[in-house]
Amino acid sequence: MLEKRVELTCKGRGFKSEEVLRDGVLVTIRLSKRLNSETISVGPENCLYNTGGHGQRCKAAHPDQDKVGDGVLCAFSFDYPYVLEFKPDWQPPEMLVNAIGGMKRLEEPK
């Protein structure tokens, strides 16, 4: 398993994908890739607002409830390239572009 961690400041997401936290919170994002696999799993490790069965939802817009309606998807929780099957025009969060590109190039050590 190949892993990489990236620290970033996240301002959470609201119901219209807008940032909702004025100051943001420091979050560690873990990227992992099995050897000989194309799939990169991405997700937050220590976010106060991360919730959901697979850690895929953001509750920054509603901190007292885990989910409101369908919930708000976390911008930093996805499996690449599977995310493209549901949203073909999806682009990775700008803060993770280099990290994802680096993981895509990693190969099994010799």
Image (cartoon, helix red, strand yellow):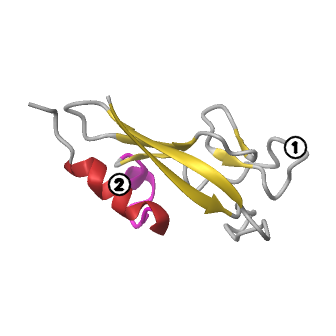
Structural crowding at the residue carrying mark 2, measured as other residues with C-alpha within 10 Å and reported as few (<14), some (14–19) or many (≥20): some
5 inside magenta stretch? no
Specify the quadrant of the image occupied by residue 19. Answer: bottom right
Quarter of image, res 2: top left
Q: Which residue is mark 1?
A: 65
Q: CA distance from mark 1 to mark 2?
A: 31 Å
Q: Is residue 82 left or right of residue 35?
A: right
Amino acid carrying mark 1 in the image:
Gln
Segment colored magenta: 82-93
Q: Which x, y percent locates residue 65?
A: 87, 43
Can residue 64 be seen here? The reply is yes
SS type, badge 1? loop
Which one is earlier in the sequence, the residue at label 1 or at label 2? Answer: 1
Q: Position of residue 90 (x, y in %)?
A: 43, 64
Which quarter of the rendered picture does the C terminus lie within?
Answer: top left
Q: In front: mark 1 or mark 2?
A: 2
Closer to us: 87 or 5 = 5
Check if residue 87 falls in the magenta segment.
yes
Q: Is residue 93 visible?
A: no
Q: Nearer the viewer, residue 85 or 58?
A: 58
Q: Badge 1, how many Cα within 10 Å: few under 14, some, many 20+?
A: few
| Residue occupied by mark 2 | 100
| 75 sits to left or right of 80 | right
Q: Secondary structure at mark 2?
A: helix
What percent of the width, then of the height, locates residue 72? 70, 54
Quadrant for residue 38, please give it.
top left
